[in-house]
Image (cartoon, rainbow, N blue to C red):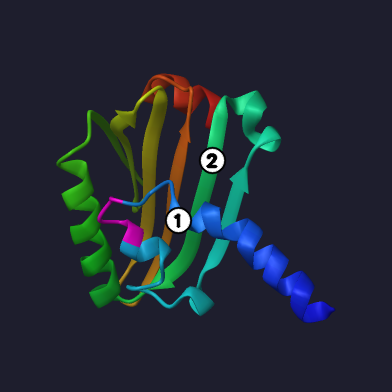
Amino acid sequence: MKKLIVLILMAALLPLTASAQTGLHSDAIFKGQVVPQSSMVEVKVKGRTLSRYRLTFYHSVRFNATAQQKASIDNLIERDARQAVSTETRKQSGRRSLILSLPPEGQTHRYLCYVSGGHGNKNAITLVYMEGKVASIDELRKLIQ
């Protein structure tokens, strides 16, 4: 019975992992190919909970990265930034934040947010992918503040 419940849950959650940030270079980060997933705090939200923010999908990972891992992550984010429609970068007190507005898929607007701070082997990183009806970075920033 427990195995059946686990299989049903896995089948229900599989579509969440198969869509969204697929096609982005940073998808490798979300999949645990740069930093092991066991070292990440991951949050996925889809559906009604996000509707008040006019979002349909939210996926974040938070972790500490070594200098080598951070270099790989920076490279992947930079490659995604090349296809961005618009970007916003902020630096404050040793923290860097970057918001990328990615090309929309139909009527769905997509965003990738990257926050990093620290140095050496102690780099605190948060990476967030969001999609929904929010049409600009300015509008998104108002929602997430």
72, 25: nearer the viewer: 25
Label 2 Cα crowd, 10 Å radius (few <14 / some 14-19 / many 20+): many
| Residue 145 seen in the current view | no
Q: Is residue 14 left or right of residue 135?
A: right
Q: Is residue 70 left or right of residue 5?
A: left
Q: Which residue is drawn at the image coordinates 43% and 78% (left, top)?
A: 36
Q: Which residue is drawn at the image coordinates 46% and 39% (left, top)?
A: 130
Q: Amino acid at mark 2?
A: Phe
Quadrant of the image for the C terminus?
A: top right
Quadrant of the image for the N terminus?
A: bottom right
- Asked if residue 24 lies in the magenta stretch, the reply is yes
Q: Are marks 1 and 2 in contact (CB under 8 Å)?
A: no
* Residue 104 picture location, percent across and down: 32, 29
90, 23: nearer the viewer: 23
Q: Which residue is drawn at the image coordinates 22% and 68% (left, top)?
A: 72
* Residue 75 picture location, percent across and down: 18, 60
Which residue is under mark 2?
A: 57
Q: Is residue 131 left or right of residue 22?
A: right
The mark closer to the camera, 1 or 2, is 1
Q: For residue 14, what is the image quadrant?
A: bottom right
Q: State the SS at label 1.
A: helix
Q: Amino acid at mark 1?
A: Ala
Label 1 Cα crowd, 10 Å radius (few <14 / some 14-19 / many 20+): few
Q: Which residue is drawn at the image coordinates 35% and 52% (left, top)?
A: 22
Q: For residue 84, what is the image quadrant?
A: top left
Q: CA distance from mark 1 to mark 2?
A: 12 Å
For residue 45, the mark is none
For residue 120, above or below residue 105 = below
64, 139: nearer the viewer: 139
Span colored in magenta: 23-27
For residue 18, the mark is 1
Q: State the SS at label 2.
A: strand
